[in-house]
């Protein structure tokens, strides 16, 4: 019998060395499962064609939304930013998250900044 192993999210998060630089750790159909460490304010951006799911593993994440709305997530909580909704994640202290995004989702959506990480750098060797 072959014994398979699950993905150790905590171990994968320890491999993330740079804030705001997601790391792909799995794939479900056309969705990537990513882990990331966040600190500070990201950038206002929109994903026109894809929803984006944030699941907080540790810390507190604020996601600013249009019209002075925001969602605050603590460990174990998730939020799905619907496609086409402008948002800006903020981590006042380090936050560890799991993201679920389609394989076509660009890191910073409709804007490109010095924090934009191309998908090729996110994928690595997760298989």
Image: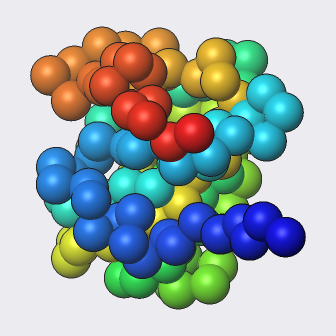
* Res. 69 visible in picture: no
* Residue 56 horizontal side relative to residue 30, left or right: left
Residue 70 pos. (x, y %): 53, 62
Rendered image coloring scheme: rainbow
Q: Nearer the viewer, residue 82 or 38?
A: 38
Looking at this view, name the residue that lies furthest to the front: 1
Residue 37 pos. (x, y %): 30, 61
Q: How many marks?
A: 0
Give the position of the N terminus as an image quadrant. Answer: bottom right
Vertical relation: 113 (above or below) 78 = above
Quarter of the figure with residue 3? bottom right
Residue ID at (59%, 23%): 105
* Residue 31 horizontal side relative to residue 71, left or right: right
Residue ID at (47%, 14%): 110
Residue ID at (69%, 40%): 27
Give the position of the C terminus as an image quadrant. Answer: top right
Quarter of the figure with residue 117? top left
Vertical relation: 25 (above or below) 6 = above
Q: Nearer the viewer, residue 115 or 110?
A: 115
Residue 92 pos. (x, y %): 22, 72
* Residue 83 horizontal side relative to residue 33, left or right: right
Q: Nearer the viewer, residue 126 or 59?
A: 126
Vertical relation: 6 (above or below) 60 = above
Q: Nearer the viewer, residue 27 or 42?
A: 27
Residue ID at (65%, 69%): 5
């Amino acid at each position: 019998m072959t014994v398979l192993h699950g993905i150790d999210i905590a171990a994968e998060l320890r491999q993330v060395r740079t804030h705001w630089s997601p790391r792909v750790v799995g794939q479900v159909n056309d969705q990537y499962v990513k882990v990331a460490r966040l600190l500070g304010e990201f950038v206002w951006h929109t994903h026109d064609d894809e929803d984006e799911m944030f699941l907080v593993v540790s810390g507190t994440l604020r996601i600013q939304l249009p019209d002075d709305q925001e969602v605050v997530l603590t460990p174990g909580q998730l939020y799905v930013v619907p496609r086409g909704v402008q948002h800006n994640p903020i981590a006042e202290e380090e936050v560890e998250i799991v993201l679920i995004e389609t394989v076509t989702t660009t890191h910073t959506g409709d804007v490109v900044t010095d924090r934009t990480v191309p998908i090729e750098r996110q994928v690595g060797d997760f298989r």
